[in-house]
Amino acid sequence: MQVSVRRLALGPLAVSRSGHLMRPVVCLWSHRTRSLFSETGVWETAYKTDTRLRLEEWWQPRIMAQCRNDALEESSKKKKFYVLSMFPYPSGRLHMGHVRVYTISDTIGHFQRMRGHQVLNPMGWDAFGLPAENAAIERGLDPEEWTKSNIQSMREQLDSLGLCFNWDREVTTCLPDYYRWTQYLFVKLFEAGLAYQKEAMVNWDPVDQTVLADEQVDENGCSWRSGAPVEQKLLTQWFIKTTNYAKPLLDSLADLPEWYGVKAMQENWIGECTGCYFDFKLKVSGEETGETLSGYCSAPETVFGAAYVAILPSHRLLHGRSSVRSALEKAFQPGKDCLTEVTAKNLFTGLEVPLVISREEAFDGHLESVIGVPDCSEEDLSLARALNLRCTTVLTSDEDGKQTLINSDEFSGLTREQAFDAITQKASEQKVGGHLTSSKLRDWLISRQRYWGTPIPVVHCGSCGPVAVPEEQLPVTLPKMPSFKGKGASPLEAAHDWVNCRCPRCKGPARRETDTMDTFVDSAWYYLRYTDPHNPDRPFERHLADRWLPVDVYIGGKEHAVMHLYYARFLCHFCKDQGLVAHREPFWKLLVQGLIKGQTFKLADSGQYLKREEIDFTDKEPVVHGGGRVEVSWEKMSKSKHNGLDPQEVVQQYGVGTVRLYTLYAAPPEQDILWNVKTDALPGVLRWQCRLWNLVTKLRGARQLGDVPSPSLLKKKELAETKKIWESKNYTIQEVTSYFTEDFLFNAAISRLMGLTNTLTSATVKVVQHSEEFEEALAALVLMIAPMTPHLASELWAGLCQVQNPLGGLLQQGGNVLQQSWPTVDPEYLQVPDFVQLSVLINNKACGTVTVPQNVSKDCERVQQLIMESPFGQKLLGERSIKRAILSPRTALINFLIDE
């Protein structure tokens, strides 16, 4: 009888009047006329396109519902596993890169649940940023409504891929209930002296009309987003003193596992932390000016020997609103080292030294001010003598070359090594410098002159200076703006009612800060909010953050391997020092996935990108219709390059399971995928799914032949076949489990599963009908594909569980495939035998087997000796000249190469 059903599916996201994203609404989709085994109990013998579409429609809402139920089952008894994929910017459309990263995280999540872990696999939105504001400028749209609409669209697309995220933990960085706590963390940084404002020459994007961090400028001096040549501009900006954490961030990398080369990138970004900054107060003619300066000392232990502090001609003190600018300009002569009447008092040593304007255009790395110590630099000594400056000797050497400090107050008598530690520690305790950093690292510039970002929670008071907004007054919410110009100063300058306020400290008139934070601040802590996303009283409860951190595996693109990762690590270190979390490092394993690239066609002469339909492929070399040479390459998918793919179109054509398997099988995660459906892994993945279906069909058919299954009916040859199946099953479980847990080589795991598929496909009907080994191996195979293609595996499992006369208990447990335990290796397989049966090949041709002791089975010379001494070896090799014997390191096999 045909059963009429309707499918429940997740519909669009609803948005409440308060602006919060709500649970998806439920909509009904009518089902097709033909039905699945799961509906009717009638198994289709062939896996056709229509079958695939119907099983994905049937299982999609059931898988999603099961995931929601799993998320609600909190259990402190289970071991936790936190898998996190980098959250997307809500552009409105998924691309194939999104499909790849989220398929990987979903696969790992399913796998770890099957292993008995409580899994956290959350999703959210990095929702502030320039595109929303540019849309508001260009099309007159409200950036908030534009963003929410895009989130709704992308949420539907993610659901259509069958991705089981913990949607109950969803975070959206542009909502006040999130950015309230971004502001809270900023205030903590401000109170700790780590957030500060200063004039600085900054990178200015003339197209997007905003400041860029150094990291957001490419090697050609262009903006990472707009592509425009970057200009230099002097502005008062907000910075976070990440340089204070440079050394801890560098050192703690050693405690982390290998990160696919990313650790080296982080180390290179931070640099060698062998020097530090010391703070100075500037004077003119003996009078304090209120101006401060930090100078870098490459040998901190010698700081008592400082003869001067030097700045570059481009330094802010010479170009901004500094109170010492006129004194510096008076002394400045381009191309010369200029002694000025400005002096700098070192707040650590108490010593006063002159300020010098260097003739150099640049110092090492990104340094703008350096402390000159003649005792440890010939260059510093030469400059001090040229300017007739007083030099103080602070180092003395004994006969063995050991250096000791002199003329260094309480540190005199210490060795250089001892003084290095003592001076830097005391300076940092006194908060006047001393934090080890490199010459190439700068503080984090977070100011952006845009509207659509987290407001910086500071008010500027004429009496009190910059004052942080008290915690009870957070969040400082963005005001509604009627229109945007997008040019020059922050749009918030025009929100007069919002800008003008009262100082929280003296209650006098004040003005709000109108710059907003760089979006990297929002994403520097989202992994923490996921652990307690609905907390109205604090960013997160410590015990919940400590329960889930560190993230067990963090997945994302290599383009974020420097900036985002560095900032996220910095903020976690800071939170640890604030007592907010127990863990210093937020991420344990890092999985960096490559790009999915499409084929591009360009006119050789102009470089113009062409559409595929504009190309003539009839000859060996493609040309433009009508003539013109074409350059063919593989590049990151992009609409402008006409090589992009719409994931929804791909899913509609091939199915969710095929697309998931393809993205996992086409290449190891860290390598790029070159998308070419005619020649790449896609046909193989399609065939493999049909073969998996055929195996279940084969078992169901064999068990319906009439005879009750009885392993006792199997003869010697068939028993040998079942042993081979048993060994292949255990070997596959061992290998696939390792691939899933160690290196995340899903392509290798699928290859191994295909090998087990081959073994089972070649099984004789009698073995299929009467052996428990075939049944258990097929069950294990379906369980192992479940994390990667849950829709297909769910239907295969349903078909297996209704096999007539099952021999083992595995198929009688009940429940969906994703509720089953991950298969484990049989204990007998792990037992090391006393003897090993070794296959013998002669010139690559199998000639038989020999039995050798296990303890010598990996010793090629000993194995060759035993074979040559045996009757088998004497018969086949006794009169032959052996050129070489090759013992396989992986399998029990030795190959003799001989002269014919």
Image (spheres, rainbow, N blue to C red):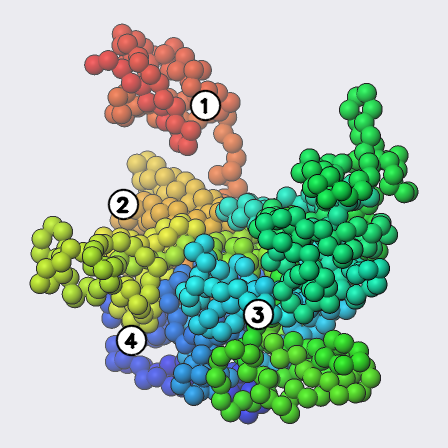
Label 4's element?
A: loop
Q: Tell us which disc is closer to us: 1 or 4.
A: 1
Q: Answer yes or no: do the residues labelled 1 and 3 have beta carbons within 8 Å?
A: no
Residue 183, given in percent of the width and then of the height, sits at 67, 75
Within-10-Å neighbours for mark 2: few <14, some 14–19, many 20+? few
SS of the residue at dot 1? loop
Could you tell me which secondary element the residue under label 2 belongs to? loop
Seen from the viewer's position, the closer of residues 701 and 291 is 291
The nearer-to-camera label among 1 and 3 is 3
Indicate the position of residue 458 as horizontal and vertical percent values: 70, 77
- Dot placed on the residue nearer the N-terminal end, 1 or 3: 3
Residue 540 visible within the image: no
The first of marks 1 and 2 along the sequence is 2
Work out whether mark 4 precedes mark 2 in sequence or the reverse, and give the earlier one. 4
The label on residue 518 is 3
Closer to the camera, 421 or 856? Answer: 421
Q: Residue at x 84, y 59 (%)?
A: 286
Please state which amino acid type lies under the numbered disc 2.
Ser
Quadrant of the image containing the C terminus: top left
**Cα distance in 3D space between marks 1 and 2:** 29 Å
Is 784 placed above or below 457 here?
above
Q: Earlier in the sequence, mark 2 or mark 3?
A: 3
User: From mark 2 to mark 3, how far is it between C-alphas?
Assistant: 59 Å
User: Which amino acid type is marked by label 4?
Assistant: Ser
Circle 4 residue: 35
Check whether the beta carbons of the residues at disc 1 and disc 4 lie within 8 A of each other: no
Q: Is residue 850 above or below residue 824?
A: above
